[in-house]
Amino acid sequence: MEMPLLQKKVCLLGDFAVGKTSLVRRFVYDRFDDKYISTIGVKVSRKSLIVPHDGGTVRMNMLLWDMAGGEDFSHVHASYLRGAAGAILVCDLTRAETLESMSRYAGDFWSINPTSPLVIVGNKVDLKDMRAITDAELQAVAESHARSPWFTSSAKTGEHVEELFQALGQLILATR
């Protein structure tokens, strides 16, 4: 029996320089680059993954929409979000103010995709000495957003990157 194939749009949302592009690059190409280049508009990447579902597996092509951070909600932004099956909200664990923005991103996303799941991610967990956001703070934000799963990750080392995308894939399949 052939494995079902689904194609799903996933948005990455968060402030400037939280690591959205680096997470996508690590997930899709298993690479990391220290050079910071600000995303302008949106960059779309694709990665196929095998997601366990109902005792079997489904092949999911994730179309990863990496959106420029910090933009005010606008009609342009709304069109980027339209049709998304899920989203990854990213904050930088070394900058507390990036956690505070999460509610705005979740609200923007759910105003257009009210039934689509979110995964909350605290990125840059490898920078232990600079950490400004605790696991408890991250968990509190996740619980306030429909009990969304949360992860700490490092695009630099790859820690929990695959797992967070897998978790979102499973949530997307569960909400179809």
Image (cartoon, rainbow, N blue to C red):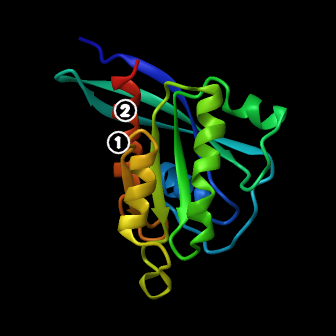
Residue 94 is marked as: none
Q: Nearer the viewer, residue 37 or 10?
A: 10
**Residue 156 location, x and y as percent?**
48, 70
Q: Nearer the viewer, residue 136 or 164?
A: 136
Disc 1 vs disc 2: Cβ atoms closer than 8 Å? yes
Q: Which quadrant holds the C terminus?
A: top left
90 over 61 or under it: above or below = below
**Residue ranking furthest to the top:** 1
**In this orientation, does residue 150 appear?**
yes
Q: How many marks?
A: 2
Which secondary structure, mark 2?
A: helix
User: Identity of the amino acid at label 1?
Assistant: Ala
Which secondary structure, mark 1?
A: helix
Read off the residue under disc 2. 171
Residue 111 horizontal side relative to residue 92, left or right: right
How far separated are the C-alphas under marks 1 and 2? 6 Å
**Residue 159 location, x and y as percent?**
37, 64
Q: Residues within 10 Å of mark 1 (few under 14, many from 20)?
A: some
Read off the residue under disc 1. 167
User: Identity of the amino acid at label 2?
Assistant: Leu
Point 82% across, 38% down: residue: 74
**In this orientation, does residue 22 appear?**
no
